[in-house]
Amino acid sequence: MKATEALGVNGIPVSVLKKGIEVRRAIIAHLVNRSLASGTVPTALKMSNVLPVFKGKSATDPASYRPICILPALSKVLETIVKSDLEDHLAKTEALPNTQFGFRKSRSTTAALATAHAKWLEAEQRGKVVGVLGFDLSAAFDTVNQLQLLPKLEKLGIAGTQLKWFHSYLTGGYQRVVWNGTESVFLPVEYGVRQGSILGPILYLVLVADVTSCVGVGNEDNSGYADDFFLWAVAHDRGQRQKKDVAVFTVNVGGVEVHPSDEIEFLGVKFDTGFTTAPHNINVAKAAAKRAALISRLAVHLPRGKYLRQLAKGLMITSY
């Protein structure tokens, strides 16, 4: 667990807890064991500060901010232990589909991209027509119905005191917004898995585990990464049709009509209708050129050597 300085409701950061771990180890172990044995999470550990993190676009639009929850340090310890046990259980029971990437060991963004791209190219090389449909779940983490998670967990073999613990963890929480030194009143958390929590991501994967297995039928395939999902269909032989006839589709959840597109973006990488990364490569080259020009202008005013190299590396790496 990272020794961060972020302050939860009780004002004690993880770094302080770790520095005194030799003195507090027995007390922490006792509290964690009591929680797990009784199937309850104390209300004090379910109270969090919410920090609005700007994502871009309009600074006056609340939707432009990501709500990051800062939990009490002891809550993070408890969640870390439960997360480890839950991940082991899910791995042993193979509860999560192989098509779901993100928040899992050895299932990174790169793995998701490589897997999907390889399947698209393989179908193309066999002379098939491939149609790709991409969609994401808006505000996915914030709109989860917490009680819908319980039957999902039970179906995966979580029962008894363990299921009772998750019910306690998911309900009865409170949060307040902290912004520029100002604190709002505490309000109950009625929806969502808290962004910034330890258990939130893996619980979200449990909730959507069956999405990629039920979105299509027949000769279709799919891939998911967190709240991004892609469905593709391999149709009959292309025959004499040109590669430019292959259509790539995108769609927004909410009833918007699907239109053909010359490009599709999957996890930050743009593909064209031939499933090459040419659009992405062009964008990267343009961004790198702009940063190279900036470095050239700065080099006139900075001494050459270690610091200029560090600046150049920092600016160029962010282009990729």
Image: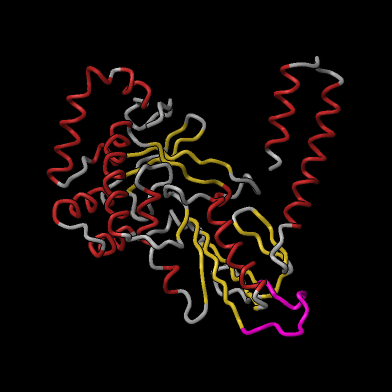
Q: Is residue 287 left or right of residue 111?
A: right
**Which residue occupies the foreground of this view, 201 or 271?**
271
Seen from this angle, which residue lies furthest front? 126
Q: Residue at x 50, y 49 (%)?
A: 108
Residue pictured at 51% horizontal, 68% vertical: 222
Q: Position of residue 209 (x, y in %)?
A: 38, 63
Which residue is depicted at the point 59% across and 55% down? Answer: 267
Q: Nearer the viewer, residue 87 or 62?
A: 87
Q: Where does the C terminus fall, quadrant-wise?
A: top right
Q: Position of residue 162 (x, y in %)?
A: 18, 51
Give the residues drawn in magenta, as a range. Answer: 236-248
Q: Give residue 192's position: percent from left, percent from top.
A: 38, 54
Residue for point 32% across, 29% down: 10
Q: Is residue 247 magenta?
A: yes
Color scheme of the displayed model: secondary structure
156 vs 298: above or below: below
In this rendered view, identify the residue nearer to me: 91 or 297.
Answer: 91
Q: Is residue 222 left or right of residue 249?
A: left
When the figure is inspected, residue 147 is found, relative to residue 298, above or below; the finding is below
State the quadrant of the N terminus.
top left
Which of the 4 quarters of the picture holds residue 3? top left
Q: Is residue 3 above or below residue 264?
A: above
Q: Is residue 31 left or right of residue 263?
A: left
Quarter of the figure with residue 239: bottom right
Left/right placement of residue 207 relative to residue 43 reads right
Give the total of numbered labels: 0
> Where residue 210 appears, x then y in whole percent?
38, 67
In the figure, 318 relative to 304: above or below? below
Q: Is residue 211 magenta?
A: no
